[in-house]
Image (tube, grey):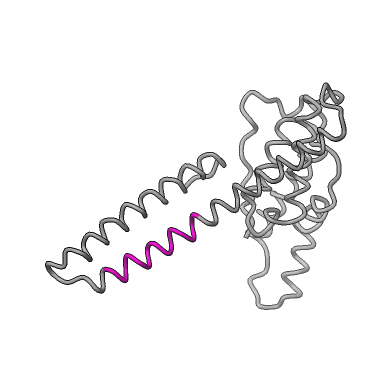
Amino acid sequence: MPNTSVPAAAEGVSANRCKDPLLAVIRAYQQGYDDFNVNAPKTSDDSAVSAYVDASYGPHLARLNDWEGPAGSMEGAVEALRLALNDTGGVKDTEAGERMVAAALAFLEKGGCGTIGARDDEGEVRAARIEAKETALSLIDLQDRLCHVRSLVTLVDYALEGMSLEGDEEVNALQAGVSQVYDGVKSAEDLLKSVRGETS
């Protein structure tokens, strides 16, 4: 399910400083999903659930899927990136996620609420947009891979534990090595989460 909690405004940024239609849609989407989580019918009737999706967050998610143009404020750009990176089951890994990355980048390229600044060469702008998108997707892919490796290391550790006999120094040494690998992978995963602004 999407992670739709509404974070506080970016530090030092006034929410009313710039007119930002994208931020308004993001907030409406988050509030709609919160409403869905609390009030959606608890039933196996798919049509009833689908109807509540349409009445809560569905229309706002559709607008994010079709969004074109930059964010209108720094807060909007930050929230767009958060959705693209963290909104699992909703915006993350979808066309909407790609559009949120593009909207945030377009705002930064403009240098704020004003007009496009020095970076107005179309080729340079296009290359920067592709680079930003690839970086965001690479971070997501790296975290997924680290999680997969950590799971495999855990399985190997369980297997070694089942094989271990008292005084079996080779198996014990392997278990110690696997434990160190696990700690290293977990540390790297935690570091990546902190870079992406996630909590464990």
Q: Position of residue 155 (x, y in %)?
A: 38, 68
In which quadrant is the N terminus drawn?
bottom right
- Image: magenta residue range: 146-160
Left or right of 135 in this view: 130: right
Does 47 appear in magenta? no
Could you say which is closer to the camera, residue 117 or residue 84?
Answer: 117
Left or right of 175 in this view: 73: right
The dominant secondary structure in magenta is helix
Write the residue at 71% across / 40% down. Answer: 132
Write the residue at 75% across / 65% down. Answer: 52
User: Considering only vertical position in the picture, is 56 above or below 8?
Assistant: below
In the image, farthest residue toward the bottom:
44
* Quarter of image, res 161: bottom left
Does 147 appear in magenta? yes
Q: Position of residue 110 (x, y in %)?
A: 81, 27
Write the residue at 23% across / 66% down. Answer: 171
User: Considering only vertical position in the picture, is 163 above or below 187?
Assistant: below
Could you say which is closer to the camera, residue 187 or residue 72?
Answer: 187
Q: Position of residue 59 (x, y in %)?
A: 81, 56
User: Considering only vertical position in the picture, is 184 above or below 160?
Assistant: above
In the image, farthest residue toward the left:
167
